Image (cartoon, rainbow, N blue to C red):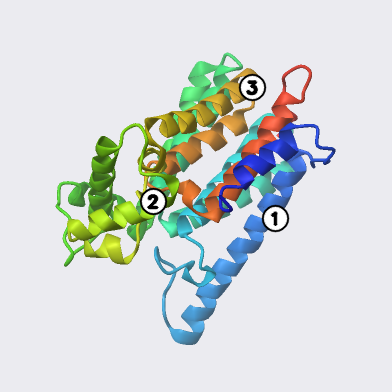
Amino acid sequence: MQLRSSMVLLPLMFLCDSGIEIPPLRQILKWFVAGGITLSLIILGHAAFILIAQHQNIFTFGNLTDFLKINRVYISLYFVMMILALANKMLQDELKRSDRIYHGILILVFVMMVILLSEREEVIALVTATVAMFMMHFISRKKTLTGIAWAAMMSCFLISVIMLFPDTQQRFLDVKKEWNQAYSDQHPTSVTIRKAVWEISGGLISKYPLSGVGTGDVEDSLLHHYQLEKLVWPYNDRLNAHNQFLQTTVALGVFGSLALLLLFITGFRIAIISRNELYFLFLLIFIISNLTESMFETEAGVVFFSFFNSVMAAECLKRKEGRCAEN
């Protein structure tokens, strides 16, 4: 309850007439990007120091952000959101040449951070959201062919960048190689571990389809079945379902899963009606992230989602014309 309290408190604060003055989304995004710049400097500075002082290369997946003690999935998700916020601003606003160059440089830096972190689902989220962003922007202006051209060009650019980083490229090749492999305690991989965990979660859902096992018993139920199936790594690491939709269904049954879907559907509906492209993209990248991670099981995911979801929805709903403030 303490972990997910912000899912209730922030919407109440921002969507109701609580008397709390909410800074404009534009200002919040400036602070958010400024935080991203600081975070990038800290991460790269630390890696450079380790390389110079200890002659150890940690500019790779699994090592780059370990010292922060934050799951790199969330860090990568933050960078993806920053990229979309900056790119959306460049599309929506008439910026001066110097500002466009500044925004472009920041986008390239944050893209590099996403590629270095090599979180597959976030790379996929970035490519998918970029395509969606250009398509929505140009189609809404009746320039469908232009949108298709820009979407294709940016997809090729991002894929080319991925190909330039061997570690990131190998991460995607590993999925193809490992997908048909069975889980093994001797040679566990992120792919085979997830497949095993998803199978266990599916079994629990089929056993308790309506009621679920209860929010307080999800971890114990999963660990019990890991032990029964002799899944050493998932048991020792106390893994969750690594899919928020499965996690919620295991805990609350199909009605809980429907409530989660309704949360996203409502957000998409608000974004579409108010023509807020950034809000739509935010929800899109979060859904993609939820397919391989249980994003609402940690504070880093819950607070990030509940804050931005509440702020963006509030700006949409409180506009008399139904239009959001400019991003």
Q: Position of residue 90 (x, y in %)?
A: 66, 36
In depth, the one of 70 and 220 nearer the eye is 220
Is residue 145 visible in the rendered structure shown here? yes
Which picture quadrant has residue 109?
bottom right
Which residue is drawn at the image coordinates 43% and 42% (left, top)? 290
Left or right of 233 on screen, residue 126 = right
- Disc 1 marks a residue whose amino acid type is Ala
For label 3, count other residues whose C-alpha is less than 10 Å away and answer few (under 14), some (14-19) or many (20+): some
Which picture quadrant has residue 118?
bottom left
CA distance separating discs 3 and 2: 41 Å
Residue that mark 1 sits on:
34
Which residue is drawn at the image coordinates 67% and 34% (left, top)? 312
In depth, the one of 275 and 153 nearer the eye is 275
Q: Are marks 2 and 1 in contact (CB under 8 Å)?
A: no
Residue that mark 2 sits on:
217
Q: Secondary structure at mark 1?
A: helix
Q: Nearer the viewer, mark 3 or mark 2?
A: 2
Q: Position of residue 49 (x, y in %)?
A: 54, 79
- Disc 3 marks a residue whose amino acid type is Arg
User: Vertically, is 1 above or below 16?
Assistant: below
Image quarter in which the C terminus is found: top right
Q: Nearer the viewer, mark 2 or mark 1?
A: 2
Of the numbered discs in the image, which one, if any, rests on residue 286?
A: none
Is residue 157 visible in the rendered structure shown here? no
For label 2, count other residues whose C-alpha is less than 10 Å away and answer few (under 14), some (14-19) or many (20+): few
Marked residue nearer the N-terminal end (3 or 2): 2
Residue that mark 3 sits on:
275
Which residue is drawn at the image coordinates 47% and 51% (left, top)? 297
Marked residue nearer the N-terminal end (3 or 1): 1
